[in-house]
């Protein structure tokens, strides 16, 4: 189906394959847009099609390198605003800086709010994102912001892949219980929690498993995987408690440093991630990492936004 012909999709360099997949879903080609660097690495943007009076959706994750991709997004928004686009929606599948959502010590920033301000003041009218690390970040924007959930895509994959066997959904920490409980309810499975004590940033020590996991397939659920240490430690602890096997479903695969090799050599049977962040070649080659797409979810949200239709059913 061809949606509103006045939709314009513009993509930066962060995740062009996802933008193209969204375009395929909407049967709308990407608007020609040049995003390049000067010799000193300043970013230059040129929108190479007329967008005057159009409804424009800019698809750009602020993933690694986060600062470059954020600046690309801001400059694309400015270029579109100066080109007289009627409405500009920033589609940010992965919102970087989301882990800095509060002051964690004296004299530290709330960078998530700063980035929200930058995007708003650049001239965007609306933001569309998925699985924000902290729900309150939605309120950091002074413009309409839709925070979609990856749960429908994840639940569908769990049902297709893991069938009707004995399963338990596991939160890798206390902070993720709400997210894990929502998944557990959808697949009619019990909930378990990994109680861990983090000694220092980037390291975690598993202390205890709350819940019965013996003889069951464990499904770890979280929004972000970065170093992979928490997932690998959790898998070891669950298997030590008698779990049959351990899977992990994560929306945003940051996978920095040696995370991919750490997961590839871990006891995780499979890590399932979405394409909110463009998978690297190492991720594609890993034996136990699989990618599922959120293009249809974002495409449907874009279509409904463009036609002023409700997006609430996409949260179910």
Image (cartoon, rainbow, N blue to C red):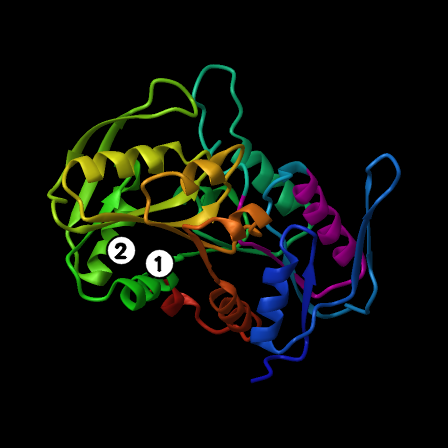
* Mark toward the start of the polypeptide (2 vs 1): 1
Instruction: Sort mark 2 into few (<14), some (14-19) or many (20+) by Cα contacts within 10 Å.
Output: many
Q: Residue furthest top?
A: 106
Eyeballing the image, is 58 above or below 227?
below
Q: Provide residue 71's location: percent of width, then percent of height.
A: 71, 42
Q: Which residues are magenta?
A: 68-95
- Provide the residue designation for mark 1: 151
| Total numbered circles | 2
- Give left or right: position of 300 versus 168: right
Q: Is residue 90 left or right of residue 152?
A: right
Q: Residue at x 68, y 49 (%)?
A: 73
Q: Which residue is at the front of the view, 188 or 141?
A: 188
Residues at discs 2 and 1 in contact (Cβ within 8 Å): yes
Residue in the picture at 88% in, 38% down: 39
User: Which residue was labeled with disc 2?
Assistant: 183
Most extreme residue toward the right, as rendered?
39
Q: Quadrant of residue 97?
A: top right
x and y percent of residue 229 in the render?
A: 39, 32
Side of 205 where 140 appears, left or right? right
Crowding near the residue tagged with mark 1, few <14, some 14–19, many ≥20 C-alpha atoms within 10 Å: many
Residue 173 appears in the picture as rendered:
no
Helix, strand or loop under label 2:
helix
Query: Which residue shows up at 78% across the image and 68% down it?
Result: 52
Which numbered disc covers residue 278? none
250 in magenta: no
Q: Position of residue 303 (x, y in %)?
A: 54, 73
Image vertical order of residue 302 relative to residue 248, above or below: below
Above or below residue 309? Residue 174 is above
Camera-side residue: 310 or 68?
Answer: 68
Query: The C terminus appears in which quarter of the rendering?
Result: bottom left
The N terminus sits in image quarter: bottom right
Residue 127: x %, y % from top left: 55, 54
């Amino acid at each position: 189906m061809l949606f509103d012909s006045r939709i314009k999709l513009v993509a930066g360099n962060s995740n062009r394959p996802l933008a193209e997949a969204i375009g395929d879903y909407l049967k709308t080609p990407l608007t020609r847009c040049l995003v390049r660097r000067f010799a000193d690495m300043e970013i230059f943007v040129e929108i190479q099609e007329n967008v005057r009076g159009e409804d424009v959706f800019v698809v750009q994750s602020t993933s690694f390198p986060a600062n470059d991709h954020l600046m690309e997004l801001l400059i694309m928004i400015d270029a579109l605003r100066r080109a007289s686009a009627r409405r500009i929606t920033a589609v940010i599948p992965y919102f970087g800086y989301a882990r800095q959502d509060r002051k964690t010590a004296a004299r530290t920033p709330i960078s998530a709010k700063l980035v929200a301000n930058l995007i708003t003041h650049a001239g965007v009218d609306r933001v569309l994102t998925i699985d924000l690390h902290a729900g309150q970040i939605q309120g950091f924007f002074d413009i309409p912001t839709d925070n979609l959930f990856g749960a429908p895509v994840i639940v569908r994959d769990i049902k297709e892949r893991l069938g009707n066997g004995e399963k338990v959904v596991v939160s890798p920490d206390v902070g993720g219980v709400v997210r894990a409980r929502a998944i557990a309810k959808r697949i009619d499975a019990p909930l378990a929690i990994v109680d861990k004590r983090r000694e220092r940033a980037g390291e975690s020590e598993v202390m205890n498993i709350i819940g019965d996991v013996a003889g069951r397939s464990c499904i770890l659920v979280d929004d972000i995987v970065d170093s992979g240490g928490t997932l690998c430690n959790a898998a070891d602890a669950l298997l030590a408690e008698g779990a049959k096997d351990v899977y992990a479903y994560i929306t945003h695969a940051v996978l920095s440093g040696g995370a991919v090799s750490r997961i590839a050599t871990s006891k995780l049977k499979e890590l399932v991630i979405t394409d909110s962040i463009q998978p690297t070649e190492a991720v594609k080659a890993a034996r136990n990492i699989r990618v599922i797409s959120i293009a249809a979810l974002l495409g449907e949200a874009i279509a409904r936004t463009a036609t002023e239709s409700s997006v609430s059913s996409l949260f179910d």
